[in-house]
Structures are given as C-alpha cells and as structure tokens.
Amino acid sequence: MKRKVLHVLHAVGGVDVYLRLITKNLNPDTFETVIVHGKTDSRTAYFDSQNNQIKEYQIPIDREINLFKDLNSVYLLVKILRKERPDVIHSHSAKGGIIARLASIFYKVNVLHTPHAYSYLSTQSKLKKRLFLTIERGFKHINSILVATSQSELDRGLKDIGYKKSKAKLFNNSVYPIKQVPPLSIEKTWPSEYICSVGRPSFQKNIELMVDVIFEIKKSKPDIHLVLLGAGLYSPNLEYIKKKIKELDIENNITILGWIDRKDIFNIIHYSTLYLTTSRYEGLPYSVIESLAMGKAIVATNVDGNKDLVKNNFNGFLIDNANKDQISQAVLKLINDDDLRESMGENSQKFFDEKFNMEQNIKILESIYLNN
C-alpha cells in the first residue's frame, strides 16, 4: 500500500520550488501526494514523476497573521485530513507549520515541519523576534519532527528551538544537474558581461546592500552591471530599491527583472560572470544551489543557508558583517582573475555533486517519509 503524504503550505517562491522538485521526484509506486495550499498563491498544477496531476485543495493560508482566518484554515484542514487520511503531514514555513500542527491535534499524525528559514530571523524587532521564537518553541511539542533544508537550519532547530536530535532530520534542498542550458525566451536588455543575483527586494534578501555594492564597484569599474531576478509577487521593498538606484545614479548598471520562467533564470545565471547574494538569512537558497550546479564562483554574506553552500576561498568568498567594501573587493577580485574564478567554479560543481544532487538526495526524503 502506498504511503500518503499531505503537504500544507503557502506556495510561493522557494517553498513552491521545493515542493515541485520533491513531488516530481518521489517514487509514485511508493508514495501518494496530496497538496493543501493558499488560495492566493500558485495557480500552476503540480505533477508527479509520471506526469500525473496531483490532487490539490485550497484554503486561506497567507503570510500575515489573522486569527479568524487562521482558525478557519485549521478547521478546513481538519476536514481535509479526515477525508484524505494521510500517513504523514509535511508542513512548510511558519504559517503552514502552525496550521498543520494545530490541525494534527484533531487528527493524530506526525507533522514533518520544514521552516525554510525560521520566521524569527525575518524581523529586526526584538519583541517580534521573541514572539516568533516562543511560538516555534511551543509548536515543536505538537506532533512535530523537524526536516531542515540545511545544516545551519538543523543547528538552529536543535539549539534555538530545542528539538531533540531524535526529532530532527536533514534533507538538503537539492536540484537535478543542469546539463543543458535553454535559450533565453525573453528580450535581453543587459550587457553581455554581467553579474547576477536572484532575490525579491525584501528584508531577508537585503538588496539595499547589493545596490551599495554596485555603487562602490562602479568607482573602479564603471561598466559593472548587475542583473537582479525575482522582483515579483512579494517584493515589499521594490519601490525603495528603485528610488535608491536612481539617487545613486546607477540606473544603467542594474537591470531588475520580475518573476520569469526557471529556464530563463538558468540561462541568465549560466552566462553571468559570477553569482552574488547579500541575504541576511536563508534556508538553503535554490538560486545558489543552481549556481553551484552550473559551476559559478559565488560571493555571499556569511549567514545561515549561504554558509552551507559557499566555502570561503574554495568556491567563492563569504563576507562577515554585511561589509559592502569587502563584498565589493571580493566581486572585483573574481572579475579580474579569470584563473581564480574558473578554479572556484570547478569547485562549486564538485560540491554540488557531493551534497545537493537530487538524483541521490531524494532517497533521503523518501526514507524520512517511510520511517516517521
């Protein structure tokens, strides 16, 4: 008999990518998948490895806290659970985790919870940070097993949240090797030589710092150009970023693109000189994993998620304390040293094959589903 796995999530961004990758790669002879996601998020159907469409339900699951809506979502999810009778629930991100674990009180089943970067990292407010941390610590007691996307996320689950080691598992975010780079399907409006990054303008991605870095680099390299992808559905700081770019007079040095097809993202990363990320925190970012898979040298802030993917002086540079001068110098060093950049790119490819290749790693998740 197949083991039924029911996912609960707000299906946007990297969380949606995660779900599509694992559902497309699970063994359909062993697992049956059901998906419960928000009414306002992904509109594209999900498919298994045999290209069969996966059953979906939509209930109100939004980022913002709304007590009435959230309790109603718990009620609706309980009804779905009693109808579908899953063997295990896999919840994603803070809101999906709260709704799923509350619902599991009324339908006793293990909830495998994947934070995709803990919510208490998402705010500068000490009060909110304490509140979010308290919520995570409390909910770990409700039928909860941590399935971390990275070693640093696993470490936070053990140290900050207080999961027991027996209740904490690791399944690295993973992708398939990118063996062919598809042609670009959108109009190319940027120069042939550029660096790139994927990240919505938000507190997490810290695009303000990236803009400052480009401003600094321009002083010694006037033709520096950044292609920033992902300014789409949830980009709360987009207008501020555009204003900052204009004030610094670097409009000709930055191209901002909204949500585009993943194939176009692969193309743009592949033909870039290097990959740059200035995030304040991550789960385990797919865009950086894809950069590894395509053999790119990477400059990254030394934070959760990034530090799992970039080894300093091996496949790129990790910069502490969001230091714009050090980031600028690291980018310039790689741009100006072809041999170093190529060597680091080769190391990225090797690191990907060892740790983040979906062909090997999907078996880890299947084992977690079978044994919890």
Image (spheres, rainbow, N blue to C red):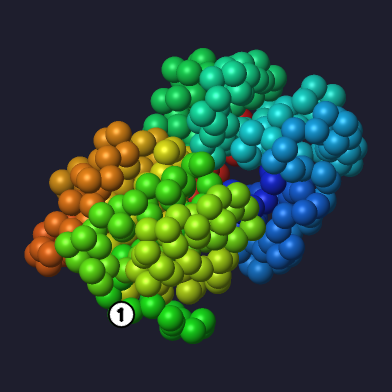
- Answer yes or no: is residue 257 visible: yes
Dividing the picture into quarters, in which one does residue 332 lie?
bottom left
At horizontal 44% and vertical 82% (from top left) the residue drawn is: 188
> Pointer 1: residues within 10 angstroms few (<14), some, or many (20+)?
few
Comparing 20 with 130, the one in front is 130
Amino acid found under the numbered disc labelled 1: Ser
Q: Is residue 79 above or below residue 314?
A: above
Residue 267 image offset from top left, x and y in percent: 41, 74
Comparing 288 with 26, the one in front is 288
Residue 175 image offset from top left, x and y in percent: 45, 57
Assign a secondary structure to mark 1: loop
Residue 263 image offset from top left, x and y in percent: 49, 73
At horizontal 49% and vertical 84% (from top left) the residue drawn is: 187
| Quadrant placement of the C terminus | top right
At horizontal 41% and vertical 68% (from top left) the residue drawn is: 251
Q: Is residue 123 left or right of residue 50?
A: left
